């Protein structure tokens, strides 16, 4: 990278800042991790002693050296804080969901264009090892014309979570659909584009829950392709995260990306073992021959690469490249989530 690093500030150092952002901002030479907002306990300095810990977001936005702000605060604050950052002259990388309504998405991108700044949305699940493998299998054409696709993210979490913005009725952007649904919808849109139509079903199963904790979204595409996106918080036995059926075969893959677990355990992205799935995590590719003979192949996953998203941020800010998560992708996603 010939251009200077992007001086970056984090709006929060909770799980998201600690796991998904700070490790990349400190190991990727395209970035300088300068500052973070920590209103209470100052934790970031324990691992990053050179980082400034501000007490308030206003202090972060007033730092003239900072060029890029990562908006990794609760869902219902994303829009307001991103607008503040843009008005302060900063590019923004916003955690999913970028906003709660389509009107907010339009306002964000309209303001960014007016000010000559970049709005980018952090959709890291495009860079999961399993999803990278799925895209490669689909794009290879080996499955023939696609018939049916399933993307899942299953959990088993009976207790109501401590993050009130996700669990409280009436809080914009609450519930599982806006949480994990933003990942699955983005996965589908990034491969297949905007659907012709969709049916969304949500439900609430955990005792005392005020929000949806299950959803299924059925997307229809040209040539009778059906895509199903499913997630639940009471799924005791997780099903394969990826199931793709085509006229010539099928591909089945568990969600075994290791990046989040490695980062949470303290591994840094520049570790040679980072992102490599363990043996036995291969996807199953079943192909049918002309005589109905069946061939089975075990497809190893590519290395997971969340750093690819930060590379895209760098090229977008420094070289005016098109960010892969486009404005249209986000507009379609939020339209579906808010419906």
Image (cartoon, rainbow, N blue to C red):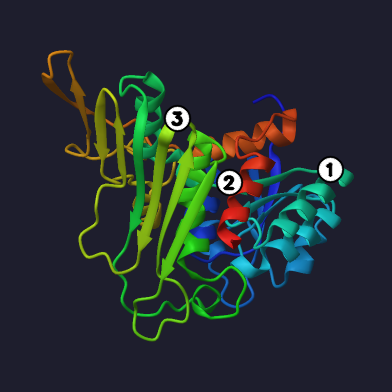
User: Label 1's element?
Assistant: helix
Residue sticking out furthest to the bottom = 208
Q: Distance between the residues labelled 2 and 1?
A: 25 Å
Above or below residue 148? Residue 66 is below
Name the image quarter holding the N terminus: top right
- The percent coordinates of residue 302 (x first, y second) are 34, 30
Q: How far apart are marks 2 and 3 (CA)?
A: 43 Å
Please tell me how crowded label 3 is: few (under 14), some (14-19), or many (20+) other residues with Cα within 10 Å.
Answer: few
Above or below residue 204? Residue 179 is above
Q: Residue at x 43, y 63 (%)?
A: 201
Give the tally of numbered discs: 3
Does residue 329 appear in this view? yes
Residue sitting nearer the eye, 66 or 70: 70
- The percent coordinates of residue 312 (x first, y second) are 61, 34
Name the image quarter holding the C terminus: bottom right
User: Label 3's element?
Assistant: helix
User: Which residue corresponds to mark 1?
Assistant: 113
Q: Which of marks 2 and 3 is in front?
A: 3
Residue 223: which numbered mark, if any?
Answer: 3
Classify residue 65 as left or right of residue 304. Answer: right
Please tell me how crowded label 1 is: few (under 14), some (14-19), or many (20+) other residues with Cα within 10 Å.
Answer: few
Q: Which residue is drawn at 55% across and 56% down?
A: 48
Residue sitting nearer the eye, 141 or 225: 225
Q: Residue at x 28, y 39 (%)?
A: 277
- The percent coordinates of residue 220 (x first, y second) are 47, 42
User: Label 2's element?
Assistant: helix
User: Which residue corresponds to mark 2?
Assistant: 25
Residue sitting nearer the eye, 307 or 241: 241
Please tell me how crowded label 2 is: few (under 14), some (14-19), or many (20+) other residues with Cα within 10 Å.
Answer: many
């Amino acid at each position: 990278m010939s251009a200077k690093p992007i001086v970056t500030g984090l709006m929060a150092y909770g799980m998201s800042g600690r796991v998904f952002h700070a490790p990349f901002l400190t190991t990727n030479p395209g970035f300088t991790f300068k500052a973070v907002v920590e209103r209470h306990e100052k934790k970031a300095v324990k691992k990053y002693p050179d980082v400034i810990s501000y007490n308030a977001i206003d202090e972060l936005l007033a730092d003239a050296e900072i060029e890029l702000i990562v908006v990794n605060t609760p869902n219902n604050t994303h829009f307001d804080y991103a607008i503040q950052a843009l008005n302060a002259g900063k590019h923004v990388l916003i955690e999913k969901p970028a906003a709660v309504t389509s009107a907010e998405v339009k306002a964000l991108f309209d303001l960014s264009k007016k000010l000559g700044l970049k709005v980018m949305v952090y959709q890291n699940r495009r860079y999961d090892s399993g999803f990278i493998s799925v895209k490669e299998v689909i794009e290879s054409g080996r499955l023939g014309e696609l018939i049916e696709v399933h993307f899942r993210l299953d959990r088993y979490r009976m207790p109501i979570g401590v993050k009130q913005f996700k669990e409280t009725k009436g809080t914009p952007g609450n519930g599982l659909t806006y949480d994990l649904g933003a990942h699955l919808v983005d996965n589908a849109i990034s491969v297949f584009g905007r659907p012709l139509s969709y049916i969304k079903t949500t439900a609430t199963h955990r005792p005392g829950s005020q929000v949806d904790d299950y959803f299924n979204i059925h997307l229809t595409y040209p040539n009778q392709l059906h895509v199903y996106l499913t997630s639940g918080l009471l799924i005791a036995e997780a099903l394969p995260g990826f199931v793709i059926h085509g006229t010539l075969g099928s591909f089945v893959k568990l969600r075994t990306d290791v990046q989040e677990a490695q980062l949470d355990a303290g591994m840094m992205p520049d570790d040679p073992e980072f992102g490599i799935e363990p043996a036995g995590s291969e996807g199953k590719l079943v192909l049918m021959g002309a005589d109905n003979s069946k061939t089975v192949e075990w497809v190893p996953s590519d290395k997971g690469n969340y750093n690819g998203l930060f590379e895209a941020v760098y090229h977008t800010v420094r070289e005016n490249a098109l960010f892969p998560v486009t404005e249209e992708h986000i507009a379609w996603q939020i339209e579906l989530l808010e419906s």
